[in-house]
Amino acid sequence: MRLPTLISVLTLSTLAHAGTPVESPSHSTPTKPDVNWLTGEGVNIGGFLFPHVHFQSVYGGTTADDVDHLGAGHHDPQRDGWTIQGFEFGTSLRAGEYLEGFGTYHLYYDRATDDWDGEFEEWFGKIKNLPGGLELRGGRYLSRFGLQNPVHMHGWDFVDSALVNGRFLGDDGLYTIGGEASWTLPVSWTSVLSVSVGVAPEHEHEHEGHEHAEEALFEAEGSLFSDTFVTANWTNQWNYNDFHQFRYGVSGAWGDNEFGRTSQVYGIHLEYLWRQNGLEAGGSYFRWRTEAMYRRFGAVAEAHEHEHEHEEEEGHHAEEDHDHDHEAPARRTLDEFGIYTALAYGFDSGLEFGLRGDYVQGIAAAGLDERFRLSPSVTWYLNKNRTLYFRTQYNYDHSSDFGDEHSLWGQVGFNWGGPEVR
């Protein structure tokens, strides 16, 4: 079992995900809910530890020869047939008015090793209710960047990750081992500015873009953050009235990448939510969410590296061969654009219809294809607390590399426990 170091999350529970507020610092101690052992709501240990359990698994198939070419993240379906996306065992700490914390362990079936594996995805502590609307968080946490990145897999609206998130931020999402300060601005609407400084965890999973690994001049993985980096996120929530809500903002991340140069990622995000019952629970709802990102990174590749090694094996030591030793590495600055937009319409009965469109521009020099994906889905939540659900999703994929592929997936999910500390 792998046990990386620190962790933190900014996830959304499945119920709250239908109408999520801005992740603003808390300003009051939540009242103790009634205990519901069936859903996990209010279940606690000693009045300050609140456990959470989540499970997701998907079954289906695709016309692609290799399902790995289709996935944007390592939680995505890995094979025809069953994929155990994971068990998550988490605990929220609520210790008085000022101190909170969260930790979660993710257990999953690794196709590469054909065995179970796991890791502490996140753990963090935070101090809230500080003067001036400040909140501090430290540990390992999913960085506040846009709308999807801070959300764990059990809070996703679709079976798989958005293409732009997996490609630009990493197939595990953008994590930080460090510290973060959040400030709730003194304005009439909810406006939260967060700034984080830390280091990137070691990347343990293959990143998308291996289709051209043998031909590409630059390794796509090298664009990911590998050392100290900074993220900033500004998100606003404005309620036009009780029935119409808007969330919007911008994000940025800057730091050292695996090439030993720098990477920059910028994003804008927008969400509109309509609820039939307004601020009251229940009723139908409509949600439209969009995120667009642009990234720019410096890349390095050793020129003629493979040719030189081959010639040494053959014993060729001519003077012209030794010139390769002094040849400067290839250096280039590359950029790429990506976007997704997603619609969801849900009914009080627990039925939800979704549609997502994804696009990433691609970078031929890094072995990254231009790609478009369209994903309609249907989700059925079996109870009011939305602790158990079934989801079906069809993906139409078009790539500049592999052409057209079609996939059909069925997912089952189980969520137990109350709201998690963010």
Image (spheres, rainbow, N blue to C red):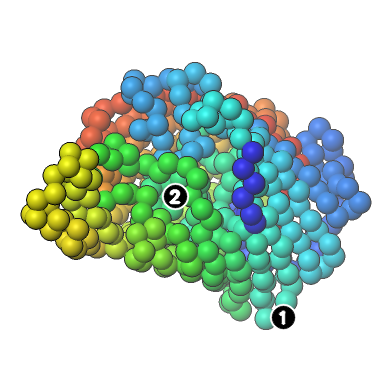
Residue 376: % across, % down: 42, 31
Q: Nearer the viewer, residue 213 or 237?
A: 213
Residue 85 lies, with reference to residue 267, above or below; the image says: above
Residue 62 picture quarter: top left
Q: Is residue 99 left or right of residue 7?
A: right
Determine which residue is flagged by label 2. 170
Left or right, 420 with respect to 65, comes to right
Q: Residue at x 23, y 35 (%)?
A: 401
Instruction: Please give the name of the residue rendered at 20% of the width and 45% of the height, measured from the top-left corner.
Output: 312
The image quarter containing residue 245 is bottom right
Q: Crowdedness of circle 1 by 10 Å Cα count: few (<14), some, many (20+)?
A: few
User: Residue 2's x, y, as percent?
Assistant: 62, 43
Direction bottom: furthest residue: 132
Mark 2 → mark 1, Cα distance in angstroms: 35 Å
Please tell me the numbered disc located at residue 283: none
Vertical order, 188 against 400 (above or below): below
Q: Amino acid at mark 1?
A: Pro
Which element is circle 1 on?
helix
The x and y percentages for residue 137 are 66, 67
Q: Relative to 183, does residue 43 appear above or below in the rendering?
A: above
Residue under label 1: 131
Looking at marks 2 and 1 on the same chain, the residue that comes earlier in the sequence is marked by 1
